[in-house]
Every structure is written in structure tokens, then in C-alpha cells.
Amino acid sequence: MNTLLYFSITGAINFIAISLFALFVYLKNPKSEVNLRCSIFNLTVAVWAFGYIFWPLANTKQEALFWFQILHCGTNFTSITLFHFVSSFLKIKKRKLLILGYTLSLFILPFIFTPYFIKNMRSIGIFPFWGVPGPMYCLYLINFFTYAILSIFFMYKAYSISSFEKKNQLKYILAGTIAGYVSGSTNYLLFFGIPFTPYLTGLTFIYVAAFVYAIAAHKLMNITIIFRKTIVYSILATIITILYFGVVLVFENIFRIYYGYKSFPISFIVIISFLLLFQPLKNYIQRMVDKYFFHGTIAQIDEENIKLREELQKTEKLKAVATLAAGMAHEIKNPLTSIKTFTEHIPKKGDDPAFRDKFYKIVGNEVDRINYTVKQLLEFSKPSKPQLKETDINNLLDDTLNLLNNDLLKHNIKAEKTYSSLPAVKVDPSQMKQVFLNILLNAIESIHNSGVITVNTTLKKDNDISIKISDTGKGIDREDLKHIFDPFFSKKDGGTGLGLSVVHGIIKKHHGKINVESSREKGTVFEILLSVS
């Protein structure tokens, strides 16, 4: 009975861990198909775990058969729902395979409660009641393992061609899935007369740990956990507590049988003795997690995260400066060409008064133009608090668009401008230029080749200046819209996910607002609202 209690307790642990994970993933983004499919897959596993709680402790054959049928209702759909999740996650179209898998599972479902699926219950090994498979059980196993293997195959195939971030996510999903299936599938050995007690069943929930780590470390399913260490410690503490109390109950039963005591005070003392060991065990595991999982203590990791964030912010700033510098190189090249042309004519026309007047005027203007351009670059690159100046927003937008002329021509993108007459507004010109530059660069990347970027400015009735930058690009998925200003959120290969976060921060410092509207394949509209002081 004590050994059977182990299977019941591990069933409870699996059920709690898997159910909570399914709920967590769904609530993080209920509108996401990937999140929904992942949650449904986990719920099927939770149904299996729920049946596993009661089946080992059943007192009659009929009771054991009922819970055996219930747990198979879950596993009947586990592999096809996993395949559906993998298909959504990898964005691969396997409609026919999905229809076939769900059709087979639905066909098998009513047979689970008939002798065609489980003919009888018999004693085998330590189990007083174990199912005797019927003819439909073979079809169930084929369906179960076929879609499990297909899921693993497609993940393995996608791994080699995925981006760095996706590879990291797939690595843990793949490892967790294999571990979960291997541990859970040890139950099937007894069906074929192989005398292997499925103790590994208790580790089925380990795949949840792999998924949680992929979420915490690599934003699996675009789930961002801010306090990642706290979440991990909470999950570990819960799992350890459940496991520990399960072990306490089992060992207390063993002590009671071995020593033959029946008094409640002695039972209480034995349990308390075990519980006194809990805190040192938890502290030891926490140290191990710090060392091997997070590679440092909480204080050290916080310090490293601050440094990482600063480095990424510098990188994002440098990327913007690099783009600005490229545009300014073009701005500097034109004046230098004019100056060079005039200097080449000095030997021949140096004595011509009209030429000298024209030379002084044009060269002076071109030098001023170069000086202004370099000054802009220096101001832009300086990390400083907003230096508010009365600024003409229309002129600032023109300056930014001029810097991107080469990019617009290169990608065959037309820039259309509709400006209203606006009062001057107090902003930091270099920081606002960074805002416009980031949004326009995103628009260019979204369009990629051939399209239109429209820039509109209007003065609203509430005395706010509205700046709208819209594009005809591929747009943003609805599920991603609420995350685009989150630090480190990026769908671009090599993106830091700080560009729009920096934009949002600058607008906030200027006491303004930024809104975004977008739909897939229909483009994106950013609207910036600034108050006229």
C-alpha cells in the first residue's frame, strides 16, 4: 500500500504542476493561438494525472477500471494536441495530419469505456489492478506514439534552420517533451508483460520545468517574466514542499508499520522530526539553483542584469547613431563635392571677381552646412537629460526624413508628408529625432521593398500636437501589440527589443503619449501626442 501511495502522490504532484502551468500560459495571452494550444495540451496531461491520483488506491476492480478509463481519456488526446501546439509554434501547415489525428482520437474516445479498449483488470507486480488491453488499445497506441514522434521530428527539423532565440526555445521544449514522454511511457511496458514498475511516472512533470525555464530565459511564447528568480524559487518551493510532505507521509507510515506504534503523539513527533529537516534542505537547493541555474546569487544576478540592460541600451543608442551617421555622411558628401569643384577652378578663375564672390558665398554656406550636420550628430550621441528648446516639429521631421533619403530610395519607398501649421513646442530636438528615427526605421524594415510612409502633423482641439507616422508594411500581430514597448521584446533576428522601449521612455519624459494601431498585412500607424506649453 505504501508503494501505491507513492504513485498516487506523484499523480497529485503532476496534476497540480501541469494544471497551474496550463492556466498560467493561457492567462498570459488568451488571444494567442500558440498559448491556447499549449494550454490544451497540458490540460490533457492533467486529466491523465488526475486519474492517476485515484486509480492506484482503488479498493475494487470497478473503481480501478473507472479511473483507468478516465486517465486514458486524457492521454488519448495528449499527442495530437501536442502536435497541434508544435504546428502553431513553428507556424507550419499540417491540416490533413491534424484532421486525421483528431478524427482518430474522437473515434477511439467512446471505446475507452468498453471492453474493446480495456478487457479486464488483473493483478500485476505491485499493482492489484492493472488493465488488460483490448483490440482498440493497439489503435490508441499507434495514434499516441505516431503524433508524439511527429511532434519531436518537426521540432528537431526546425531546430537547424531557426534563429538563435528560437533554437534556445526549441532546445528546452524538445528536451522537456522527450523527458516527459519517456517517463510517462514507462507505464506501457506492463501492458506487454515487461516487468518494469513505472516509478519514473513521478517525473512526468519535469517537462513543465523545461517549459518554464524556456519562458524565463528565452521568452517562450513571448511570455516575459520580470521577476524570473522569484517565479523559479516559488515553483521550486511548491514542488519541493509537495514532494517532501509526500515523502514524510510515506516514511511515517513505514515507521508506524515497522515499530508498530499507533499513538497520535508519537506520529506527531515523527512528522515534526522530518519537517525540521525541511528548511536546511530548501536552503541547500536554493544555493544549488543559484550556482547552476542562475550562475550566481540573487544579488550578483541583479547586478549583472543592470549591467546587461545598460549595455543593451548603449547598443541601441549606437545603432541609432550609426544610422544617423550614415545619413549624415551623405549630407556631408554633397557640400564637400561643391567645395572640391570650386577649388579645382581657382587656378583658372581665381582672378575673376564674380567667381570669387560666388566661391566665398557657396563655400561659406557649405562649411556652415557641414558644421551644422556634425553638431547634430554630436548632440544626438550625447547621453543627457532632455534639454527642452522651442522647436518646430515639422522642420525636425524633415531633417529626419532627409537623413533617411538613401534608405528610402534603396527600398523603393515613397515618403508622403502632410503638415499643418503648428506652434513651436518645447522638446529636446536630438531625443525627438531619435524617436522619429526609430519609428521610421521600423517602418522601412516593415515595408522592406516598395511601399509608402506617410507623415502627418495636426493641431488638435485640446491644444495637443499630433504626429502620425504610418506605413504600408506587413503590420504587427494583434497579440504582439501590447508588448511592443516592453524592454527586450523583439520578433526581429538580432533585435535587442529596446528601440521602441527607448522611444516610449523619451515620450514619457516629455509628458507626451504614444499610441499604435496595426493589423497584419495592412500596415502600422504610430501617433505621438505632445502638449503645447
Image (cartoon, rainbow, N blue to C red):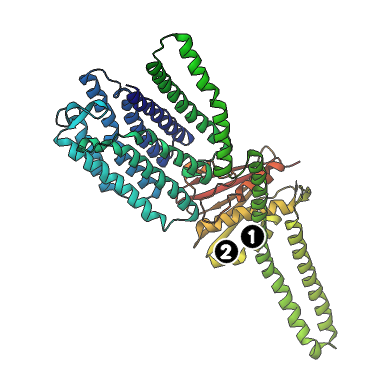
Is residue 419 toward the left or the right of residue 409 in the image?
right
Please, what is the three-letter code of the amino acid marked with disc 1? Leu
Which residue lies at the image location 66% right of the left edge and 62% below the top edge? 322
Is residue 265 toward the left or the right of residue 40 in the image?
right
Residue 420: x %, y % from top left: 66, 50
Residue 272: x %, y % from top left: 52, 18
Q: Indicate which disc, 1 or 2, sits on the residue closer to the N terminus.
A: 1
Q: How many marks?
A: 2
- List the single residue furthest toward the bottom: 348
Please, what is the three-letter code of the amino acid marked with disc 2? Leu
Residue 177: x %, y % from top left: 38, 43
- Mark 1 touching mark 2, by CB under 8 A? yes
Read off the residue under disc 1. Answer: 401
202 versus 56 height, above or below: below
Placement of the N terminus among the 4 image quadrants: top left
Q: Nearer the viewer, residue 98 or 289?
A: 289
Classed neighbour count for the residue bearing mark 2: other residues with Cα under 10 Å, few (<14), some (14–19), many (≥20): many
Read off the residue under disc 2. Answer: 408
